[in-house]
Amino acid sequence: MFPERLAQVQGAVGAALDEAIARYPAGSLRDAMAYAATGGKRLRAFLVLESAALFGVADALPAATAVEALHAYSLVHDDMPCMDDDDLRRGLPTVHVKWDEATAVLAGDALQTLAFALCTAPALGPHRIELVAALAEASGAGGMVHGQALDIAAETAAVPLSLAEITRLQAGKTGALISFAAEAGAILAGADRAPLAAYARALGLAFQIADDILDVEGSEQAAGKRLHKDAAAGKATFVSLLGLAGAKQRAAELVAEAEAALAPYGEKAETLRDAARYVIARDK
Amino acid sequence: MFPERLAQVQGAVGAALDEAIARYPAGSLRDAMAYAATGGKRLRAFLVLESAALFGVADALPAATAVEALHAYSLVHDDMPCMDDDDLRRGLPTVHVKWDEATAVLAGDALQTLAFALCTAPALGPHRIELVAALAEASGAGGMVHGQALDIAAETAAVPLSLAEITRLQAGKTGALISFAAEAGAILAGADRAPLAAYARALGLAFQIADDILDVEGSEQAAGKRLHKDAAAGKATFVSLLGLAGAKQRAAELVAEAEAALAPYGEKAETLRDAARYVIARDK
């Protein structure tokens, strides 16, 4: 049931992003924003919409769209030559390759702004100011951008990172935004965020371990991005630290942990449990 | 009375920015953010606090701090080699010179996020979600970033921009955030924004014309940034289009217009009127 739901989310969020971006003045900035916001798994949007459904929050689409705009901005900047220097993303040339670095800086900047704009949609109801605060907390210098900075620093570090350090890096770089997404429904409902926070912590870590496994075992064609970069760069990953079998074992444990955290929601959370099983089985 | 008030604002906002940034994890990202957020005229913060005072909004400091964090982010990214390629800002090396380009991308990104975080401060009251929306509107792909993109495009354009085009560019690049700042008090009070919008439109344009005059007549030491770049690059400016005397005349007219727009607020708006007279007399 997860793949069907994800396909629905992809359609709805893709259309909402296109519509939001189409409101800006025409030009290469707008074109680059639309290009960068196209495609992707939309896992974060799915988490927003499913967590909202748990609490009967009717229209969480602007929040789901916001988290994907935020994620798209982070990818555009992360792919730049001064950062990870990637030329391929979602199977297509990255923004600075297709346009130029200035356009990549500005399109990323404006996608971040759009994410916050979307969180102010009146449809999101009276708790949307807390949503803005949570998105800023998750994505800023104490969350995602902090993780990015640790990642960049690790590339020039004399010794590879330890398991504790790489876990902390991941908690910022990918974990914080996944946690925001999973907690968004509870935030909008003014409900307790703790069970979803526990789910998201385990899910986010399993997601990153699966990413490291994919970097070793995956196909670039399926993934739509360059792989095997970590080993080539001598970077510490969950695979280099735990071994391939150990990483798979750890990911499976985390999925069980994520599923267990959803106990308070019973049957209603079945699609979220299914999602946890999916993140370690994916090929992109 | 404006210089005294501005000095107060500089102290209060500088301390608030330091305090907000100090909450993030230690490291070069945080150091670069603090560095980029230091100094500056704080004209935008002044406008937030003075417009708030017009409506009796008690604690607008987080909003004043937010607009300066947003402005600092835009300068860090704008100074990068792929953008304006500036090595000097506020009398010091720019962030990518002192650290590196990756740090400049990330510090700018995180300063933008901080700006939105600050707008969620409960002290700002029940209208702060509209403040978030207005900041996103002013700073995104329909406002400031749109202006930046037009500015970059103008550098490689075959013919210099016309007066109408350069006015539109300025309205985005510097005008939108100045307007946000001047209207912030009305937004937080849920009051009519029209008089302050008219004031800010004239003030923002006068500010940019003064900047172009400064680029021709100013001293780099006083300005704390590189000057004479526009003429060297053959860029159209208000001075190249109107002549030096014509530009000064137009700026003076705009200041009179800005002062007149404040009529509904009577004596209470005297410091804002004083500010308008200041922006065309400044040397930095």
Image: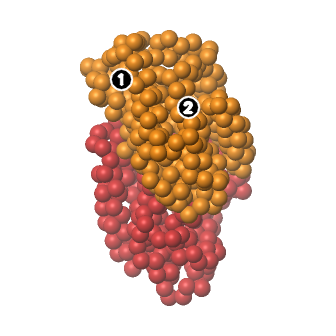
Chain colours: A red, B orange
Q: Mark 2 vs mark 1: same chain?
A: yes
Instruction: Say which quarter of the image contains residue B70.
Output: top right
At 49% from the left and 81% from the top, the residue drawn is A54
Q: Decide which of A156, B99 is in the foreground and name it.
A: B99
**In the image, what residue type sits under mark 2?**
Ala
Instruction: Say if residue B29 shows up in the picture.
Output: yes
Residue located beneath label 1 in the image? B155
- Count every numbered label the image shows and give the total: 2
Residue located beneath label 2 in the image? B275
Query: Which of the marked residues, 2 or 1, is nearer the chain's N terminus?
Result: 1
Instruction: Say which quarter of the image contains residue A139.
Output: bottom right
Q: Decide which of B106, A97 is in the foreground and name it.
A: B106
Question: Which secondary structure, mark 2?
Answer: helix
In space, the residues marked 2 and 1 are separated at their CA atoms by: 31 Å
Q: Is residue A242 left or right of residue B101?
A: right
At 50% from the left and 81% from the top, the residue drawn is A55
Q: Decide which of A53, A272 is in the foreground and name it.
A: A53
Say above or below: A29 vs A134.
above
Question: Which secondary structure, mark 1?
Answer: helix
Q: Is residue B174 left or right of residue B240?
A: right
Q: Decide which of B121, A160 is in the foreground and name it.
A: B121
Q: Is residue A262 left or right of residue A21?
A: right
Say above or below: A15 vs A92.
below
Quadrant where the C terminus of chain B sits is top right
Query: What chain does badge 2 belong to?
Result: B
**In the image, what residue type sits under mark 1?**
Glu
Q: Where is residue B141? Give x, y as percent.
A: 39, 44
Say above or below: A256 vs A150.
below
Q: Where is residue A125? Give x, y as percent.
A: 47, 71
Q: Residues within 10 Å of mark 1 (few under 14, many from 20)?
A: some
Dots 2, 1 in contact, CB < 8 A: no
Query: What chain does badge 1 belong to?
Result: B
